[in-house]
Image (tube, grey):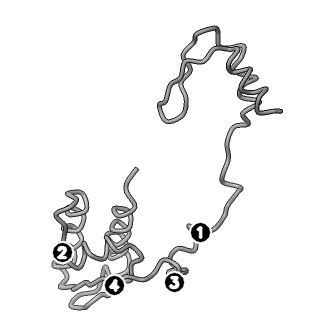
C-alpha cells in the first residue's frame, strides 16, 4: 500500500505517456489536487522522500526525451470533481464484510479453549470459545 502522495505522482507518471505519447516540444500544465505532488514536480524532486524523488526522476526523464516541459499547479480537491468522480462514487455493491454473528457461530465449533485465532491484517488475539460467544451475545443485546 502506497502513500497518497506517491499515488498522486504515479497518476502523473502514468497519465503523461497515455495522453502525450506522440507529442514533442510542448509545455504541459498539470492541475493536481495534492500540494506535495505539485511541489515535487515543480522542484524536480524532493529531499524528503527517496520514493517520491525516484518517481519524479522517471517522470522528468520521460519528458526530457520528448522535450516536454511540465509544470504543476494546485487545484483544490473540491474543484477537482471530474478527475475524482469515480473515487467519490458510493458503490455499496462492491463493499462487503462478513456477518459477525454468523462468523462467530461458524468459529465456535472450530476453536477450543486457549486457541490462537488469526485476525485480519495479521493481528492475532488469544480468544477462548467462551469469550467469542460472550462477544457475540453482547453485540446482539
Disc 3 or 2, which lies upstream in sequence? 2
Label 4: which residue?
73
Residue 80, percent across and down? 50, 80
Above or below residue 56? Residue 16 is below
User: Are the residues at dot 4 and dot 1 in contact (C-beta closer than 8 Å)?
Assistant: no
Q: Tell me the quarter of the image containing the C terminus.
A: top right
Residue 20, percent across and down? 33, 82
> Seen in the image, is 92 located left or right of residue 86?
right
Which of the two marks, 1 or 3, is nearer to us in this view?
A: 3
Disc 3 or 4, which lies upstream in sequence? 4
Label 1: which residue?
88
Distance between mark 4 and mark 1 Cα atoms? 22 Å
Distance between mark 3 and mark 2 Cα atoms? 25 Å
Distance between mark 4 and mark 2 Cα atoms? 14 Å
Label 2: which residue?
44
Residue 22, percent across and down? 30, 83
Comparing 27 with 112, the one in front is: 112
Disc 4 or 2, which lies upstream in sequence? 2
Residue at the spot 40% in from the left edge and 50% down from the top edge:
1
Comparing 129 with 81, the one in front is: 129
> Seen in the image, is 116 located left or right of residue 39?
right
Q: Residue furthest top?
A: 113
Disc 2 or 1, which lies upstream in sequence? 2
The image quadrant that residue 93 belongs to is: bottom right
Label 3: which residue?
79
Above or below residue 43? Residue 53 is above
Distance between mark 1 and mark 3 Cα atoms? 13 Å
Amino acid at each position: 500500500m502506497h502513500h497518497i502522495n506517491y499515488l498522486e505522482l504515479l497518476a502523473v507518471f502514468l497519465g503523461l505517456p497515455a495522453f502525450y505519447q506522440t507529442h514533442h516540444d510542448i509545455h504541459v500544465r498539470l492541475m493536481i489536487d495534492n500540494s506535495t505532488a505539485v511541489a515535487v514536480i515543480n522542484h524536480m524532486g524532493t529531499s524528503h522522500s527517496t520514493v517520491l524523488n525516484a518517481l519524479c526522476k522517471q517522470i522528468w526523464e520521460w519528458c526530457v526525451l520528448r522535450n516536454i516541459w511540465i509544470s504543476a499547479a494546485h487545484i483544490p480537491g473540491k474543484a477537482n470533481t471530474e478527475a475524482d468522480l469515480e473515487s467519490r462514487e458510493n458503490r455499496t455493491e462492491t463493499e462487503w464484510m462478513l456477518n459477525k454473528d454468523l462468523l462467530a457461530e461458524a468459529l465456535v465449533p472450530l476453536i477450543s479453549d486457549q486457541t490462537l485465532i488469526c485476525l485480519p491484517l495479521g493481528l492475532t488475539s488469544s480468544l477462548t470459545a467462551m469469550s467469542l460467544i460472550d462477544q457475540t451475545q453482547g453485540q446482539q443485546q
